[in-house]
Amino acid sequence: MTKLQSINPFTEELNAEFDLISREELSEKIDTAHRAFLEWKKTPNSRKKELMLKLADTIEAEQDELAKIETKEMGMLYTFSFAGLTKTANLIRWFANNFENILKSEEFETNGLKVQTQYDPLGVIYGIAPWNFPFNQVLRAAVPNILAGNTTIYKHASNTPIAGAKIEELFLKAGFPVGIYQNLFVLPSESEYILSRKEVAGVNLTGSEGAGSAIGALAGKYLKPSVLELGGNDAFIVLKTDNIKKVAEEAIKARISNNGQKCNSSKRFIVLEKYYEDFCKYAVEYTKTLKIGDPMQAETQIGPMAKEFLLNEIDSQVQKTVKEGAKLLIGGKRIDRKGYFYEPTILADVTPEMTSYKEEIFGPVASIIKVKDVDEAIELANKSDFGLCGAVYGDDSEEILEVAKRIETGMVFLNKPAASQASLPFGGVKKSGYGKENGPEGLKAFTNKKVIVL
């Protein structure tokens, strides 16, 4: 591969293509980032805040264009993207307004000693971005890293190069010095060279389990700190409720968000047997009403998958699960039309031995699992290699809270779908990765907490 191509998943037409940079150009970008770091770390916090607030304003000023980029590059619904960019701008404002207090020095006494602590930036941080949220996923990692005093170089996903280039442009338009944020048009194979460079002080990746394993190994080899936000196969537990229809509809809405391409969306729906048949019935009824089509149209609820190979991957996982004994309630195949469309699919009677239970399916596919009681629901929720998010629905607030406390994930949401917030740490356990983005933990992820004994 000598070029990165952006393909519109709705029309299957070429949006644009970009040349990969050479090793020499990559080396110069790392040098530029390091030189920028030496000055940036001395920049007053007031100036950092000013620039970040300008970045948020710049995003909102170009919100329509940015939303169209996401829609044309990876099929995100325009309405969903537009709303998400407001959330991204507000995320930037939250970090800009809170980073100084979170990273402030502290003084205290312990064992007769006077101690002072401070958070020092590490240097150049290498970021690796996914394609499913081309702007938000990058900025929620890059913004706190930069406010902490680091600079960053980012390799965006190969199918979203327009978004990758646009992010660097946004930083420059907001007034950031050259080198604070740089986009890299490189292949994954360049990651070892990047992490081998002494100027590069850490790596932040959002991606698949396989990518996380590879980058984690390289980070270990070169002794670089890392934050890995990987996949999820989250449980959505349904307990005692007087409104199973509403819960079933909420479940499907959560599953099809971003066309089913969210690491933190619920994928395994664990339902008490008392409500199981009704849950399945109402889930199918709601799925039949979904509007599939042009992601630019406001009435569309499901657009195309981001990449063609995803269709084959999703279909293979669905067919394997059916052969293993699951019941196909609706969907289960590629839609015969132009564009990378897959039918919204519901699999029932899924068990822990089946493919859709064990693997993350990155598309509009829901797996429904019947359990006899709360203890079995918790057991099956935790019987997973992943542990990113979870959701518990039910009318008994005390019961669902107690269940949430026993779920092995980074986050659990009660009577609401999983979502991220700038102020809350985001990250998982098990094969969902390690480290945190967002919140105070995200700001401190690539800093050195220095202890000074007076």
Image: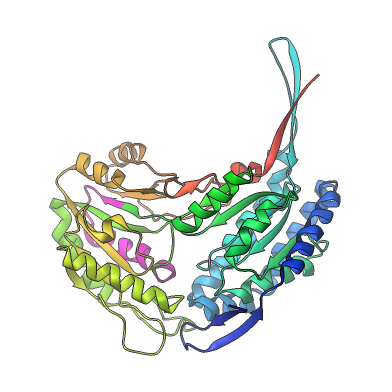
Q: Is residue 352 magenta?
A: no
Image-based side of 357 in relation to 360, left or right: left
Image-based side of 264 in relation to 49, left or right: left
Q: Which residue is found at the position 23% from the left and 67% from the top?
A: 320
Q: Which residue is found at the position 32% from the left and 77% from the top?
A: 290
Question: Is residue 414 in sight in this rendering?
Answer: no
What is the quadrant of the N terminus in the image?
Answer: bottom right
Q: Quadrant of residue 322?
A: bottom left
Q: Quadrant of residue 68?
A: bottom right
Q: Is residue 244 magenta?
A: yes
What is the quadrant of the C terminus in the image?
Answer: top right
Residue 61 at x, y percent in the picture: 70, 73
Residue 248 at x, y percent in the picture: 26, 61
Q: Which residue is found at the position 61% from the left and 61% from the top?
A: 138
Q: Which residue is found at the position 79% from the left and 64% from the top?
A: 28
Image-based side of 442 in relation to 275, left or right: right
Q: Main secondary structure of the magenta part?
A: helix
Residue 450 at x, y percent in the picture: 73, 31
Residue 365 at x, y percent in the picture: 31, 67
Q: Considering depth in this image, is 317 or 452 the residue closer to the camera?
A: 317
Asked if 260 appears above or below 214 in the picture, the reply is: below
Image-based side of 353 in relation to 397, left or right: left
How is the rendered protein coloured?
A: rainbow
- Single out the residue that lies furthest toward the top: 112
Q: Magenta stretch: give its range.
A: 236-259
Asked if 201 appears above or below 276 in the picture, the reply is: above
